[in-house]
Image (tube, helix red, strand yellow):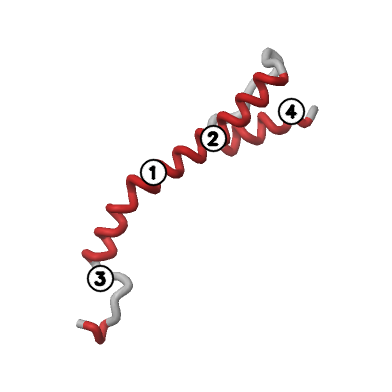
């Protein structure tokens, strides 16, 4: 297996897209698919972090997590 095939398979698995059939793709197509899979996975994690931050922040306030018992 060449390094390009190994890269695209690893990137697809890390990006959550699953294994890919690489026989029909050119080397440029494999590199693009691998980089896109890594970018899409990173973008998904970033967007979910931004969307869930207010919810987690509100939960921390609601349940008084992180506060000292003597401060009340």
Q: Is residue 14 left or right of residue 24?
A: left
Report, in whole angstroms, how far the alpha carbon at label 3 lies from the one at label 1: 24 Å
Q: Earlier in the sequence, mark 3 or mark 1?
A: 1
Give how far across and how far down residue 20 sits, in percent. Answer: 63, 24
Around disc 4, counting alpha carbons within 10 Å, would you say few (fewer than 14), some (14 to 19), or many (20 or more)? some
Q: Quadrant of the N terminus?
A: top right
Q: Is residue 52 left or right of residue 11?
A: left
Q: Is residue 36 left or right of residue 29?
A: left
Q: Which residue in the structure is indicated by mark 4?
A: 4
Local SS, label 2: helix
Q: Which residue in the rendered view is the most extreme toward the bottom?
A: 70
Local SS, label 1: helix
Q: Cβ–Cβ below 8 Å for labels 3 and 4?
A: no
Q: Earlier in the sequence, mark 2 or mark 3?
A: 2
Report, in whole angstroms, how far the alpha carbon at label 1 lies from the one at label 4: 30 Å
Give how far across and how far down residue 7 sits, in percent. Answer: 70, 33
Q: Which residue in the structure is indicated by mark 2?
A: 39
Q: Cβ–Cβ below 8 Å for labels 1 and 4?
A: no
Q: Which residue in the rendered view is the most extreme toward the top?
A: 24
Around disc 1, counting alpha carbons within 10 Å, would you say few (fewer than 14), some (14 to 19), or many (20 or more)? few
Around disc 3, counting alpha carbons within 10 Å, would you say few (fewer than 14), some (14 to 19), or many (20 or more)? few
Q: Nearer the viewer, mark 2 or mark 3?
A: 2
Q: Relative to residue 7, is residue 25 depicted above or below?
A: above
Q: Which residue in the structure is indicated by mark 3?
A: 64
Local SS, label 3: loop
């Amino acid at each position: 297996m060449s390094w390009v095939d190994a890269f695209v398979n690893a990137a697809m698995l890390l990006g959550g897209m699953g294994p890919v059939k690489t026989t029909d793709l050119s080397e440029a197509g494999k590199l693009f698919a691998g980089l896109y899979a890594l970018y899409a996975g990173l973008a998904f994690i970033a967007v979910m972090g931004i969307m869930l931050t207010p919810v987690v922040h509100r939960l921390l306030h609601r349940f008084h997590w992180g506060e000292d018992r003597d401060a009340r």
